[in-house]
Amino acid sequence: MRVLFIYPNLDAEESFNHGIAALSGALKARGHTTGLIHLNEVFSPVPSPQEIVERVRQWGPGLLAFSVMTQQYSYALSLARVIKASLPRLPLAVGGIHTIMCTEHVKADGIWDFVGIGECDQALPELVDRLEHGDPEHINVRDFCVRRPDGSYQDNPLGPYPDLSASPPKDYAIFDLPSLLLARNGWQSIMTSRGCPFRCTYCFNHEVVDRYRKQGGQSPKGYLRHHPIPRVISELKDLKRRYGDQIQTFIFDDDILTLDERYCCDLVKAYTGAEIGIPFVLNAHVQAFREPVARALSESPCRIVKFGVESGSYELRKNVLARSMTNQEIIDAFDLCHEYGLQSSAFLMFGLPYETREMMEETIGLIARLTPGRMRWSIFFPFPGTRSHRICQDGGLIDESKMQAMKNFSSASCLKFSADTALFVRKLQRTFHWWVNASAGFPLSGEYNKVTAEIDSLDLDAWEEASETIRARDREISTAYLARINTADPAPLNDYRHYSLRYTEVMAVLSDFVTEEPGDFKNRPVRQWKAFRE
Ligand code: SF4
């Protein structure tokens, strides 16, 4: 059968989708044909719904499968309605993290024939086999809620977690990788595992584990799974062979690659031994980052170790986010990273439930102490289905109309804060790195103190006007300091150390690394939209 995926990756960073690559690989291994419509502004112009209908009609799928995240669901739903009106006999499937977290809402929309409720690596090929052969048993395929002719759904149980040691190769080529790599400065995503044993309230993992336990009888212990290392290495070599002139960095996008210390060390050693040579970055956890891993990484082409810090307030982390690490554990992990000559990166959030200005200042203080090589921040968003969403609902914290109107979660908060706190969140969203520069005890901290004092004094109207100028002003200030570093011999790195915005408006890089890596805001390539990838 011909299965066409639709990936509505709109109003978001253009991204590779491992779910689609895995499912397409599994379908191809069973002899089916797959294609992809990847919708993102990078593939400009984004076609209209009617144009998409025509392309779907031309391609002639037997099943149309959407992969959605929460922010893209309303677009996917409206597109699915347009497609259904024009092609009423074409079955529509939907999957992705949103359908797992919000299954009942998705079913209530009444348009989807198949709603994926788990990892469908084995279930989707089985469903497609049965549909192809007109087998009425397709209604019983596990991992799916299947719509009956009367519009009600049959809720099938979840099967076991897919076994990653036996899964078919991922279909990377279903994506237009040359265009994606161009747009992403040559960064290619890799995943060697699935699952995470932590239960952070803002993350989907606790809900996935609970559903597999309740509806599939699966032990939470089985959730973390790895692809065999030889398979990962051969995947990497294959990508290098096919796209090596475009890939600058591999990003191991596993939730946390350092969780299984033995696997991580063996993988890193195999990567180094296989002479892949391309630098890589990975996600770590401060409570799962010890000396053996740091040493193995320091002897490899590892570029950056990324940690989720989220907040500098221990109380907020523990009581609201269910992240119980102490500030000292965070400091120790970053220090270990730096001792081994590894560049660190910190993920942060502001506008957390019950967060006060003082707590945000604790975050600034902690980051100033850690001095990561780079940091990336976002505004907290209560994803429906997560415990953090329930915390916000129970506390009456959500401004529902704001939340419905939001298209992305990095630029504004949908929580109700006092006017002063809300304004401070907005200011940090643009200028967090300046506050860190002011607090870090850098020789330039005094200069940045003047800048943050000025920002702090702005009322809402003045901030609205000033906020549009931040990026240009940041670049102007930073360029002047970098010029002083670059023109002196030896370079006075310490004298002019500072963070500046790089790549996006929510990422700052320390000047030590900017001099090696002259990152800039993306020159988004505008590529002719490619209708289909097969
Ligand atoms: S550690 Fe990261 S991946 Fe794991 S549950 Fe927490 S946020 Fe999710």
Image (cartoon, grey):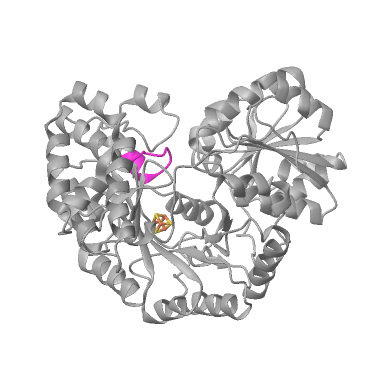
Looking at the image, is 269 positioned above or below residue 92?
below
Q: Is residue 389 magenta?
A: yes
Residue nearest the observer in this picture, 118 or 463: 463
Task: Report the quarter where the N terminus lies.
Answer: top right
Residue in view at x 74 percent, y 54 percent: 25
Residue 528 percent location from the top left of the image: 69, 33
Residue 195 percent location from the top left of the image: 50, 60
Q: Is residue 97 left or right of residue 499?
A: right
Ligand 1 sits in quadrant: bottom left
Residue nearest the observer in this picture, 129 or 239: 239
Looking at the image, is 207 positioned above or below residue 192?
above
Residue span colored magenta: 380-391
Residue 307 percent location from the top left of the image: 37, 61
Q: Is residue 480 left or right of residue 226?
A: left
Q: Quadrant of residue 67?
A: top right
Instruction: Report whether residue 254 is seen.
Output: yes
Looking at the image, is 8 positioned above or below residue 230?
above
Total marks in image: 0
Residue in view at x 58 percent, y 65 percent: 192
Residue in view at x 31 percent, y 61 percent: 372
Residue in view at x 19 percent, y 36 percent: 424
Q: Residue furthest right?
A: 133
